[in-house]
Every structure is written in structure tokens, then in C-alpha cells.
Image: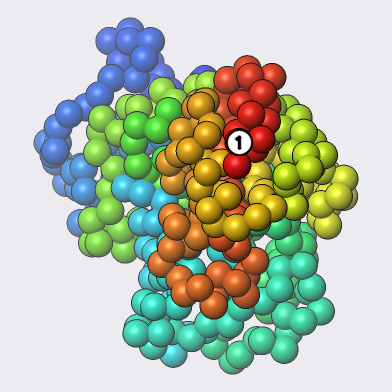
Amino acid sequence: MDNVFKHIETKLIHSGEPDPRILGAVSMPIFQSAMYETYGGEGYHDIAYIRLNNTPNHAALHDKLAALENAESALVTASGMAAITTSLLTLLSSGDHVLFQPDLYGGTRGFVINDLPALGIAYDFIDASTPDSWESKLRAKTKVIYVETISNPLMGVGDLEAVVNFAKSHNLVSIIDNTFASPINFRPPELGYDLSIHSCTKYLNGHSDIVAGTIIGRRDLVEKIKHKLDHLGGSLDPHACFLLHRGLKTLALRVQYQNDSALKIANFLNDHPKIAKVNYPGLETHPAHERALKLFDGCGGMLSYELKGDAESAEQFLKSVKLPIIAPSLGGVESLLTRPALTSHAGISAEEREETGITDTLIRMSVGIEATVELIEDLDQALKAS
């Protein structure tokens, strides 16, 4: 953990940087070499090789990412899903059991439902907001409890403090997907989470031009996950490492602006006659608003809302917007809109979507850094046209 820099804005720029700088280079160079000269070492995982996630580009990112959340260690991966699946496959084996909240990112939920049972790993879903109900789901071989900081796409905020306490009292590993919040708004290791996972594709990189992931947290667990990742091969290439390293430098500026813009947009939509419901923790009407204010430094740039009407109305709205791009990812400098029923949650059944509240008229919005007033004007004209 980096103890030199006090504030996250400074850590984003200076933590993890080579000291001394490599030939005086102000920017971290790209080490485009698959392997390095090897002089001994303690074992296979110490060999300097891209697939073993230990090149100079990897090392700089690991130090910087750990510093951002005040954690012991960090590891970058080839994607957010590589971070999620490798972590779970490291900590769970046949006969084990894991607890998940149900309103997960569709890729995570699909892995839980379709892949874990095939490996002999059992699961149960828990309501992240009702800790009193969790004990009844425990089994003798429950090993992990897994939640999201802000759930995708309904923007729920569970009792995140209770998750940590429950995990500690029952000797479980606590994992949280912190992608939507980013370290600017929330740093799970400070609350006691064992592992914090991000899709770096989103806010951490912020420019919609790479796919990457990270696992941040306890050194012993991160090391175990690295060993599994070394064999599974989900390493990040040096050029993607460089782009992520560069994107991180502006994270605070981007997220702080997106926090402010998203709240203004959520308030506008909340008062609009063509909107049935807005999901955003920053709104006083959100069921977990007080919890979000207590835990977070900002409520993020993600929101979702249901249009009045049907799927055809939702499609007409998406065709009518001019500024946001209709695309399924999030966290970049450009605003993005998507219908989760057709993108992030298309892989689960209509019945499951209905159970979790993902309707055909639900729109998820990732607020970029465009002028807020222009985004609101554009959304207004699109709603009038739908």
C-alpha cells in the first residue's frame, strides 16, 4: 500500500510510477516484449512473462490500483469477466456453496446459473438489503458472499456494511463488484471487503477503447488468484496496460463531473410525465438513498429509468436521441444508452428478467462528460417523440 500520497487525485497521478523514471520518461513506456531475461527465481510464477502478469506495465498498474482503494494488493486481467470468473474459480471448488445477490450484471448472473452448477458448485440468491434473511441460506460449505456496490441495471444499494460483518462472523470471503461506483466514490477495502472487482473497461479506463479487469484486496487472496490466472491465461497485454494506466490519470475529474451530471439528469427524468420510474441512489425517492449518502462520496454516473408505454415506445425513444450513443457498455466519456433486456441481460430468460424487475421499457444510461444541459434537452425531445 502506498503511504506517501494522501489524496486519491494525487495517487491517480503518482502512485505506482517507476522510481527512478525509466530513462527520464514522464509517461510510463509500453514494454512490448512477451518475455524477459530470467536469472533464477523462486518458481514458475516468478518468470517474467506477459501471461504471468508481471511485466513492468503490469507492476505499475498493480501498485497504482491497490493505492486507489487503500488495499494490500491488486491484479489486472484481460476483462472484467476474467476478474470475476477467475476469482470465483480460485475460491470455490466442487461441493462448495456461494451466496449472491440476484440483481447482478447479466454476465455474472449467467456464469452463476449456467456454469457453477456444472462444476459442482451450489449457489443461493440473497436479498442484499435484508441481512436477517441471510443466515437461513448458509450451508456447511458456504465459502463466499458476492454483491455489487450499485447493482446493474436497477441501481440498488444493499446493506454493504452488513455483508462485511456477516462474512467475518461466518468465515466467508466477501467479494464486491465496485465497477459502477469506482474508487472515487467508494473504496470497499476501507469497509473491510476482502476483494473488490472492477471491469476496467468502464470508469477506470474511461475512453471505451480497451477491455480489462482488476481484482483489488487482500494480498494472500490476490496472489492465489494470480496463480490461477497464470494458468487460465487471462492476462492483459502491454498496450492495453498502457491505455488503462493513462486513462486512470483523469478518473477523478471524469467521475466527479459524471456524479453531478447524473444527479441533474435523474431529477429531470423523475419529474418527466413520460417516465414511470427512475433508479438512481442520489434521488431522495431511492429506497437506499440514506445508505448511499452514508457510504459513498458520490452516487455515480449510472442511472436507469422505465418509460411509460411498451417496448415499441422504448425503441422509438432510442431512435430519437441524438447525443447518447446506443451501445451496451458504460463508464466512458461519451453518454451511452441501452435496453438491458436486449443487451446486458439478454442471456437470461424473460421470466428471470421479470423476477428481477428488468422490464422491456427499462433504459440504462451511462452519463458521459457532455454538457449536462444539452443532454437534458436531447432526452426531452426524444421523450416527446416516443
Q: Which residue is mark 1?
A: 385
Point out the residue furthest to the top here. Answer: 24
Residue 119 in sight here: yes
Point out the residue furthest to the front here. Answer: 385
Image position, residue 84 (x, y; %): 44, 60
> How are the residues colored?
rainbow
Image position, residue 155 (x, y; %): 67, 53
Quadrant assignment for the C terminus: top right
Image position, residue 317 (x, y; %): 56, 41
Up/down of 118 relative to 233, above or below: below
Residue 173 in sight here: no
Q: Is residue 113 left or right of residue 125?
A: left
Up/down of 29 relative to 381, above or below: above
Q: Is residue 101 left or right of residue 242?
A: right
Q: Is residue 63 left or right of residue 370?
A: left
Q: Is residue 64 left or right of residue 21?
A: right
